[in-house]
Every structure is written in C-alpha cells, then in structure tokens.
Image (tube, rainbow, N blue to C red):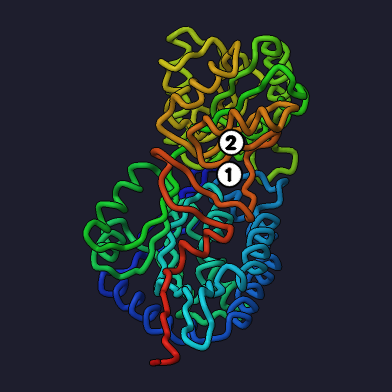
C-alpha cells in the first residue's frame, strides 16, 4: 500500500495498493500487445484521441486543482497546470506530422531511400510530484502520438494525478491498454526495467533516483531520458531592468514553495545594483502570505513533505552558522510551524562553501551574491554539479548569447526564467541528466530511426 500524506494537515489523503510483480508483468504485457494496433492507426487519429483526452482533463480542472492542494500543497489561487498542459500538448500535436515524417534521401527511377521514425514500443513514464501533470505530459503526449503505448508510474505524493490522466485520456478515446496508470514499489519498477520490459524509460526525479534507473537498465540497452537535479542561477547585469528582474527572479525562486525543477536557487547581481536588488527582493517576499493552500488569499503553501522542509531548514541554518545573513523576519510568517509550513527566506553574505549555494534546496530560499564582472558571474554559475537552466538579465541580446555560450547548462533565458517553451528542447547536462523532451527532438527521443534502401531497377 502506498499512501499520500497531505502537507496541509498530515492526514492520509489517498492510498492505493501496489501491483505484485506478476500483476505488473501482466500489465506491461497488455501494453505491449496493444502497441502494434495503436501504431497502425493513422497519425491523425492518434493525435485526435490524445487531444480529446487533454480536453477531458481540462474539464475536470476544478477537481484537479483542489486535489493538488491536498496532495502537494500548491495554492488553489494559481489554477493548477492545465494552461501549460494545453500549450505543450497542442504544440507537440501541431508538429507531429513534420517531426515524424520520413527523411527522403532519393526517389528516382533507380532507388527509393529514406529514413523513417518508428516507435520504441512500450514507454514507461516515472513522473515527479512537484508538477505532476506538466512533467508527465512532456513525454505522454508525444509518446502516444508517435505510436507508443505508455505505462505511467506517478510519485506517491501525487498518486491521484496518474488516475486523473488515465481517466481523461480514456474518456477522450485512447484505449485502456494503450495508456495504463500503475502503482508500483521501487523494487518492482527496477525489476521490470531490468527485464527489458520497455523500449524507453523517462524518469524525472533526484540524482540518486536517476542512478537507480541506470543501474536497473544496465546491460539492457533500454533508452533512458533523465531529468534530475538542478541549482539554477540568475545573473543580473548592470544594464538590467531592476524591477522586472526582482519580480521575475523572486517568483522563480519562491513559486510553488520553491519546488520547481527550473526554479531559481542562486542569484548573482552586479555590484552597482546589488543593494537595490536586495532591498526590493526583501520587500516583495515579506509581503507573501503563507498558509492553507485551499484559502484563496494564500500565495505560498506548505512544502509537499516535512522532510523536504527540514532539508531547507538545514541549508539555512548551516549558511547562517557560516556567516550568511537571513533577511526575512520570521515574525512575518507565524504560520511557520516547524513542519511542512515553511517561511520563505533570502540570504546574503553567502558563498560557495555553503550547501545552500551548491546543493539542490528545492524550497523557498535563495542566496544572493554580489559580483563585479561577467567573468566572475560565469565562473560562479558554472561552479555547480548541475546544469538545467540559467537566467540572464541584460538589455543586450548579443551579450546574453555570448555569456550563454560559456555557461554549462541546458537552457539559457534572457529576461525571464522558470518556463518551458515546448518548441525548444528541454534538456540538461552534468548531474541534471541526459536526453531531451518537447520540440522535434522530443519526438526523436521517443522513436528510433529506421533506414530504407530500396533498389527499383536491377540494371
């Protein structure tokens, strides 16, 4: 039995029995048997059924938003994830024909030569709790449209999200054996991967979890897509729009209680703007309302689990002990109860000897450092084991591109952050993982190339 403990009040919000190893194998066998028939359907039909499922998910959004608050603490005022889900799904559906089209090399009287795209077969999606619909959709939609069947294992903290996705896709007409939501323990999941049950596995989660995926898949040649940790930086240059930089970067650091894959975890500000940036950031964050996510006035809810909140507390305490200054007055947030409800915090006088500037905090805390040059900022941004995104603030696009070329990361933003453009590949480097979702390349990762060399004339 797996249980979702609600961060709102510590109650058991939902629980489901896990499949036995035998039941799990039978489930994957059903998906494998259904895959050929699904892939044989016309692309337009697969696309239409998947998008009907997205429409059905949108129709249940009020229920989904409340469930998300109970499961992982996001305030209902933000309306859930359906806007982003639709944007990503619609884009991936719109480019499917082009992305999956054969690459024609020659079509002459003598030869027909082309490269086709073929589905992997059964794709397993192991989804995280922090954005349980958005992260899952990144793979589910293109995998299904490309002709794969999908087995989804969702995080325990958001175990109802998988059920809602299955309910919606089945209501849209995707057959039950083409998209299957499962409840599995870690051991059974690893054993399925080790048994070559899947043509491709997409995992979003911790570095340790990604390492477990690689160990399970070792020797099977199963394709893996891994989005793991992050410690995303922002760099505010002397010519930046100060007010915009404060508003966007602090939202990037604190939204969803800081529990964002590409959230801003460290900020480097040119010395000419440093004091003003910090002053404005403290004023902004001090006005947040921590509280029950079901209440419309709440702007920052509890963290999803007490152990996540305690890790952030450890990072803050260790930094302060080493000389950092915490600028947010705890008295402004009496709801901080030492449990899942955690006050946001801004730290200055930080350096890279502190865990809060090096390890993934994944909570409502950000360290801000003063820098004097682009070279110093680049060195600090690259001084990380992670590489997901970096946010650059300047009025000069050429400067941003020049600096971006020197940063070890998957995505460079200028004057924005914490956003996935579905037309661009979502990818990372270093301990952030490997592979890529969304864009044309997302389709390429969910299919394999197959070459055709057809000789028409023997003379």
Give how far apart the Cα atoms at labels 1 and 2 are. 9 Å
Residue drawn at the location 38% of the way across and 84% of the way down: 33
Residue 73 is labelled as: 1
Task: Determine the secondary structure under disc 1.
Answer: loop
Residue 288 is situated, as x and y percent measured from the top left of the image, at: 70, 29
Position of the N terminus, as image quadrant, is bottom left
Q: Is residue 296 above or below residue 314?
A: below
Residue 433 is situated, as x and y percent measured from the top left of the image, at: 41, 45
Q: First in sequence, mark 1 or 2: give its number.
A: 1
Task: Determine the secondary structure under disc 2.
Answer: helix
Residue 257 is labelled as: 2
Residue 115 is situated, as x and y percent measured from the top left of the image, at: 47, 73
Q: Would residue 253 appear left or right of 202 to someone viewing this image?
A: right
Report the front residue among 87 and 399. 399
Q: Would residue 383 appear left or right of 253 to someone viewing this image?
A: left
Whether residue 102 can be seen here: yes
Q: Is residue 316 above or below residue 153?
A: above
Position of the C terminus, as image quadrant, is bottom left
Q: Is residue 272 above or below residue 410?
A: above
């Amino acid at each position: 039995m797996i249980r979702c403990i609600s961060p709102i009040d510590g109650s058991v919000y939902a629980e489901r029995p896990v499949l036995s190893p035998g039941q799990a194998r039978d489930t994957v066998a059903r998906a494998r048997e259904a895959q050929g028939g699904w892939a044989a359907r016309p692309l337009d039909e697969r696309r239409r059924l998947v998008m009907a499922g997205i429409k059905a998910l949108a129709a249940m959004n009020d229920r989904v938003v409340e469930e998300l608050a109970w499961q992982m603490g996001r305030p209902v005022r933000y309306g859930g994830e359906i806007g982003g889900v639709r944007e990503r799904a619609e884009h991936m559906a719109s480019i499917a024909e082009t992305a999956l089209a054969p690459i024609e090399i020659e079509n002459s009287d003598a030869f027909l030569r082309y490269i086709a795209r073929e589905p992997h077969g059964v794709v397993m999606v192991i989804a995280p709790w922090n954005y349980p619909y958005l992260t899952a959709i990144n793979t589910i939609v293109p995998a299904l449209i490309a002709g794969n069947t999908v087995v989804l294992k969702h995080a325990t903290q958001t175990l109802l999200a998988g059920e809602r996705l299955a309910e919606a896709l089945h209501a849209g007409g995707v057959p039950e054996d083409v998209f299957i939501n499962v409840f599995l323990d870690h051991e059974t999941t690893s054993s399925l991967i080790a048994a070559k049950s899947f043509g491709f596995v997409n995992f979003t989660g911790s570095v340790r979890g990604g390492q477990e995926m690689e160990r399970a898949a070792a020797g099977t040649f199963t394709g893996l897509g891994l989005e793991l940790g992050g410690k995303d930086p922002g760099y505010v240059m002397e010519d930046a729009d100060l007010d915009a930089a404060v508003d966007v970067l602090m939202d990037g650091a604190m939204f969803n209680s800081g529990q964002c894959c590409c959230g801003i975890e460290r900020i480097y500000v040119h010395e000419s703007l440093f004091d003003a940036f910090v002053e404005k950031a403290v004023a902004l964050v001090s006005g947040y309302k921590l509280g029950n996510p079901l209440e419309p006035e709440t702007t920052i809810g509890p963290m999803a689990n007490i152990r996540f909140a305690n890790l952030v507390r450890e990072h803050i305490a260790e930094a302060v002990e080493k000389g950092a200054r915490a600028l947010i007055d705890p008295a402004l947030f009496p709801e901080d109860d030492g449990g899942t409800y955690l006050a946001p915090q801004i730290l200055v006088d930080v350096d890279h000897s502190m865990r809060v500037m090096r390890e993934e905090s994944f909570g409502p805390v950000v360290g801000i450092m003063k820098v004097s040059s682009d070279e110093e900022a680049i060195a600090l941004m690259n001084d990380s084991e992670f590489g997901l995104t970096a946010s650059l603030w300047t009025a000069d696009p050429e400067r941003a591109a020049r600096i971006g070329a020197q940063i070890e990361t998957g995505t460079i933003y200028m004057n924005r952050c914490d956003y996935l453009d579905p037309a661009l590949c979502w990818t990372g480097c270093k301990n952030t993982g490997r592979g890529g979702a969304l864009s044309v390349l997302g389709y390429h990762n969910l299919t394999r190339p197959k070459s055709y060399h057809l000789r028409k004339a023997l003379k």
